[in-house]
Image: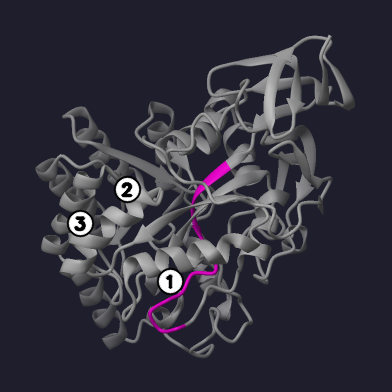
Amino acid sequence: MTTFDIVIRNGMIVTATDKYIADIGINGSKIVDIGFDLKGHETIDATGLLVLPGGIDGHCHIEQEEADGTIHEDDFVSATGSALLGGTTTVVCFASHVPGRGLVEQFDAYRRKGANSRIDFAIHQIITRTDEQTIRDEIPVVAERGAAGLKVFMTYDDFHLSDGQFLQVLEAAHKSDILVSVHCENYDAIRHLILKHLAEGRTEPHGHVTSRPPCVEREATYRAMTMSELTHQKIQIFHVSCPEVAEEIGRAQSRGVKVVAETCPHYLTLTEEDLKRDGFEGTKYICSPPLRTKAAQEGMWQYIRSGVISIISSDHCGYTFDGSVGKGRHGRDADFSLIPNGMPGLGTRLPVFYDAAINSGKIDLTDFVRLTATTPAQRYGLYPQKGTIAPGSDADLVLWDPKKSVTITNSLFQSNIDYTPYEGRSVQGWPVKVYQRGKLAMDDGKLVAPPGSGQFLKAREK
């Protein structure tokens, strides 16, 4: 009988399609066998635990350069440590496209930054301009070098593309057979509403919500899908915040438009009321699109269950609360339009979503795996190396205790970011061990994987 390097015994294996109790035999970095009574040089008893594929977070802003020269405060060491502590073994993060440097140069530089990662990573390439060099020469190169996708913005001063520019990107992506993901909000409408708010003296954090109502997200989403339909290019709508937008996506999908969608735990568990917290505290909850109402939150679940929304990502975008380049970089009396947009979420993604989705009976365990690991692996060209538990796949495994109750506090995640929006929230279900490519990477809240143990993942043909 074969003796494996590691055997994980008697756990409830959960994939996107099945749940069953069996042993997993691991040699080196790979799952080699699944069966019963397997023998290992090292045996881990997983009785009473779930064994899940390592989480894949397809939307993470890590050590990313901005147009103003600032760099996101959560670097690869910190962010990927937080990811492991929350059960995530792969991230897809973003290479910038700031002025003055070419696309390929920035993609390659960002890949080098990732050498410090504790976990495996892939890269989305942001596109902020459509000069001939970018469109004709460089998009094909980053596609060939394994970018998981391109990202475009329909809002933000330093990022947004016009409809004509967006069409150029879609046509270039179609030629290179690469996915385009879109931040959908109407730039001009938001600018109009912000100026109106400021003229009326409405500067408090909650003004961020009222200056970006659901209709500006819905309209931009419809427009993005129309251009997808025109060019026959597949797109992904990032961070869907409300059912009105999901409804538009479902209609487009039903008529054959090549569109898929993701949402994030904060749209399912937090609300716009959090931006009304006393003083500067509400800025912790500023993100775009903004948090919505409790009713909108409840309405999102039907679109998750139906598959209209098929990925749960964190949109981790960590700005410190007290740091000099964080939420207060323009002073604590700054109006809402000057507050950096984004919240940390890499470490909390799986526990918060599990508690909200599974403990309330909203979805099944197989759906949880599909949304957080399998579909992201498939969408970003990483499957079946990642995202499932099967012979030949990487031994990226999470031993999950479904009965463990934890009160979330930021210190659990050992992050460069000094707050979590879930501080004090109690959840049931928590990762207790994480294996990355067959090596123990996290053990009962202790990081084992050192910086630099992650690998760049070149996206293969989708």
* On screen, residue 446 above or below 74: above
Q: Quadrant of residue 397?
A: top right
Q: Quadrant of residue 1?
A: top right
Earlier-in-chain disc, 3 versus 2? 3
Front tag of 2 and 1 = 2
Q: For the residue marked with disc 3, what is the amino acid?
A: Val
Q: Look at mark 3 in the image and give the residue it sits on.
A: 169
Asked whether the residues under the numbered discs 3 and 2 touch, taking CB atoms below 8 Å apart as contact, a structural biologist would say no
Disc 3 versus disc 1: distance between alpha carbons? 34 Å
Asked whether the residues under the numbered discs 3 and 1 touch, taking CB atoms below 8 Å apart as contact, a structural biologist would say no
Q: Which residues are magenta?
A: 56-69
Q: Residue at x 45, y 46 (%)?
A: 297
Front tag of 3 and 2 = 3
Q: For the residue marked with disc 2, what is the amino acid?
A: Ile
Q: Quadrant of residue 202?
A: bottom left
Quadrant of the image for the C terminus? top left
Q: Is residue 293 left or right of residue 150?
A: right
Q: Residue at x 52, y 66 (%)?
A: 285
Q: Look at mark 1 in the image and give the residue it sits on.
A: 206
Q: Evaluate whether residue 317 shows in this view.
A: no
The secondary element bearing badge 2 is classed as strand
Q: Look at mark 2 in the image and give the residue it sits on.
A: 237
Q: Is residue 24 left or right of residue 16?
A: right
